[in-house]
Each structure stands twice: as structure tokens, then as C-alpha cells.
Amino acid sequence: MNYHSEEEQVQVLKDWIKENGRAVIAGLVIGVTLIGGWRYWTSWQKTQAEQASLLYVEVMAAVVREEKDQASRLGQQMLETYPGTSYASLSAMLLAGLAAQQQEYPVATARLQWVLDNSGDEGFRQVARLRLARVLAAQDKPDEALALLDKTEVAAGFASLNQEVRGDVLAQKNQSMAAAEAYRKALADLGMDAQRRKSLERKLNSLPVPAPAGEAA
């Protein structure tokens, strides 16, 4: 479309603004609001993470000193105040470990179950399942431990650990051949971790050698 004078172009612009101005302004307001909201959200997340990290240091210190009551109080504060942070899952697993050391297995189970129910990180959930299997085995519940391992979809990087825990539970059940197979799979899936390799080899070599077929026990 050709406009024959500057006055005509100005008038067309005025008419367009009159017709569309409110929508344009509304769009600008919404855009500015979204940008401001996003900046507030990211700032809030950063603040939450920083505060959670400071609290996590306190939880770790209490666990290291084996101050059960203090660790439990600080850990519960973490779970209630910063449940969406990775520090909450880490704190829950620390508290589970402390409880397991003191043979408070129901407490350890509850902490690990919290991770399974609340963590958004699959790595944390994988670790929690493996530790929960060990807690079940420590309570002389090897069949429940194996059932948990069987229904767990093993993520990449956790195959070796899963097989090691399985081997430990099978060894507890005196199923040496099955335990040996699990340990061999754990070794096959292991990367460059020399320390774990030595540990797995010791476990494998310490298994009782089955008596030859037909030989009396």
C-alpha cells in the first residue's frame, strides 16, 4: 500500500495505535511481569540452595560427632524447610546411615523411604534403594531385600553396585553359587575403581566352595 503524504502515514499509525494500543501495552506488561517473576524465582531458588547448604554442613557435623538427637533435629528441619533441594536427600541418607550404625533399622528405613518418595533425582533414589536393601538384610530379611532389588529398574552406572548388594544378600542366604555369579557380574560392570575391585574379589574368593556333585556334605 502506498501513502501519498507524510500526514497520511502518521494518521495510519495513529489509527493502528488506537485500535491495537491496549493489546500491545498489555503484552508488554505481561512480558515484564514474567521476566520479573522468573528473576524472583531463580533468586529464591538460589537463596534456598545456599541456606540448605549451610544447614547441611551442620547436619554432617552432628552425624560425624554421632550426636544423634542434634543430627535428627537438624535433619528434620532440613526435610521440612528445604524438601526440594538435593541437600534434603543427602541429609536423609546421612541420618539413615547413622541410624543403621546404631541398629535403629525402622528409623533408617523411614529416612530412606523419604528419599524414594520425595527426591526428584534418580541417582539419589537408586542409592536409597540399595541402602534400603542392605537395611532389610541387616534385619534378617534377605528375601525382602532381594525382592526390592528385583523390582528396581537399574539406572546406568548402578549395575555393579546393584549386583554387589545382591551378592551380599545371597551370601547371607548361603547361596554361594548365586552370590558368586552376582559378584562376577559386579566385577564385569565395574569401571576403574580399583578399591571396589579388590573388595569384590575378596568377597568372591571368600565364598565357600560347593562340594562336588554326589559327594556327601
Image (cartoon, rainbow, N blue to C red):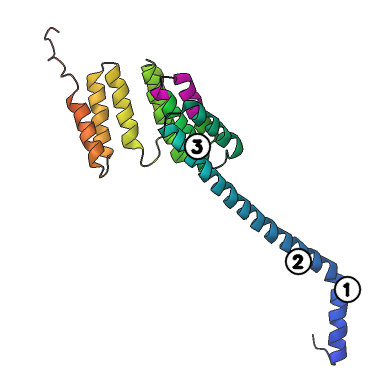
The amino acid on which the numbered mark 3 sits, given as a three-letter code, is: Ser
Viewport quadrant of the C terminus: top left
Q: Is residue 206 above or below residue 162?
A: above
Q: Secondary structure at mark 1?
A: helix
Q: Is residue 2 above or below residue 108?
A: below
Real-space Cα separation, disc 2 to disc 1, in angstroms: 16 Å
Position of residue 75 measured from the top left corner of the image (x, y, whole percent): 53, 33
Real-space Cα separation, disc 3 to disc 2, in angstroms: 41 Å
Q: Main secondary structure of the magenta part?
A: helix
Position of residue 59 measured from the top left corner of the image (x, y, whole percent): 48, 36
| Magenta range | 100-112
Q: Secondary structure at mark 2?
A: helix
Front label number (3 vs 2): 3
Position of residue 67 measured from the top left corner of the image (x, y, whole percent): 46, 28
Residue 150 occupies quadrant:
top left
Dot 1, how many residues are within 10 Å of its Cα: few (below 14), some (14-19), or many (20+)?
A: few
Position of residue 200 in the picture relative to residue 67 (left or right): left
Going from N to C along the chain, the mark reached first, 3 or 2, is 2
User: In this view of the protein, which residue sits in the foreground, 127 or 181?
Assistant: 127
Real-space Cα separation, disc 1 to disc 3, in angstroms: 56 Å
User: In this view of the protein, which residue sits in the foreground, 117 or 138?
Assistant: 138
Residue 83 occupies quadrant:
top right
Viewport quadrant of the N terminus: bottom right
> Which label is found at residue 18?
1
> Residue at image x 84%, y 71%?
21
